[in-house]
Image (cartoon, rainbow, N blue to C red):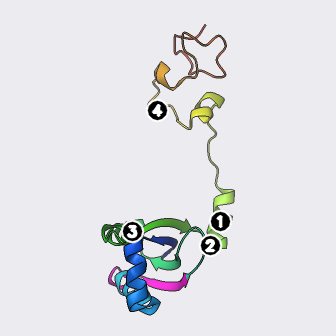
């Protein structure tokens, strides 16, 4: 099972619901929703700060996590942010994986070239008004 941290921020209407029914009812509703998708709630805390509730859940996959987020968001009473959590072992495995590095120009935009074809000039920092571009796609044709 994958582990997720869900940070929930309640709207004014959502806070009214918590005030009327209490926090236990909210936790039970979340536990039922997660259980219906084959998961479990590990922890549920109300807090101060960026969010109003911090919920750690175990779910079968990312699709289940997206379903939770969409269902809760559709209520209009809460906005959620879901963070995928990694265990120590998963993090250790990630550190030993080999990943190809992108050339400098590609790293600057966060885009990679695909299919052996060059990308167009639009991703480049140069333009007719630019005297010296900081970086450019190879073969863009517009650079001085």
Task: Give the residues in magenta.
Answer: 35-45
Query: How far is disc 2 from disc 4 in space, using C-alphas?
Result: 32 Å
Mark 4 sits on what residue? 114
- Using a 10 Å C-alpha cutoff, classify the residue at mark 4 as few (fewer than 14 neighbours), some (14 to 19) or many (20 or more): few
Q: Is residue 44 a member of the stretch shown in magenta?
A: yes
Return the mark for residue 91. 1
Specify whether residue 15 is painted magenta.
no
Do the residues bearing badges 1 and 2 touch, measured as CB atoms within 8 Å? yes
Between circles 3 and 4, the one closer to the viewer is: 3
Q: Residues within 10 Å of mark 1 (few under 14, many from 20)?
A: few
Q: Residue at x 62, y 73 (%)?
A: 87
Q: How many marks?
A: 4
Give the vertical position of 38 relative to 63 (above or below): below
Q: Which mark is residue 69?
A: 3
Could you tell me which residue is drawn at 53 percent across and 66 percent down? 84
Q: Please name whichever residue, 37 or 126, is drawn nearer the observer in this view of the structure.
A: 126
What separation in Å lies between label 2 and label 3 (alpha carbons)? 22 Å
Q: Element type at marker 3?
A: helix
- Residue at (61, 71) in percent of width and height: 49
Q: Is residue 63 left or right of residue 114?
A: left
- Residue 30 in view here: no
Q: Which residue is mark 2?
A: 87
Judge whether residue 7 can be spotted in this image: yes
| Element under disc 4 | loop
Q: CA distance from mark 1 to mark 4?
A: 28 Å
Estimate the x, y position of residue 95 in percent, counting from the top left.
68, 58
Left or right for 68, reference 57: left
Measure how far apart labels 3 and 4 are at the Cα level: 32 Å
- In this view, the mark in front (2 or 3): 3
State yes or no: discs 2 and 3 in contact (Cβ < 8 Å). no
Q: CA distance from mark 1 to mark 3?
A: 25 Å
**Secondary element at image label 2:** loop
């Amino acid at each position: 099972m994958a582990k997720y941290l869900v940070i929930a921020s309640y709207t004014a209407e959502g806070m009214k619901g918590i005030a009327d029914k209490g926090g236990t009812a909210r936790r039970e509703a979340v536990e039922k929703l997660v259980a219906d998708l084959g998961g479990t709630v590990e922890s549920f805390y109300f807090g101060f700060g960026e969010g109003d509730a911090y919920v750690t859940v175990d779910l079968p996959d990312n699709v289940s996590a997206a379903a939770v987020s969409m269902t809760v968001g559709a209520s209009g009473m809460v906005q959620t942010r879901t963070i995928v959590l990694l265990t120590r072992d998963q993090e250790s495995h990630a550190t030993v994986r080999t990943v190809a590095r992108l050339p400098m120009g590609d790293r600057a935009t966060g885009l990679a070239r695909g299919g052996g074809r060059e990308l167009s000039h639009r991703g480049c920092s140069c333009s007719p008004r630019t005297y010296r571009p900081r970086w450019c796609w190879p073969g863009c044709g517009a650079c001085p």
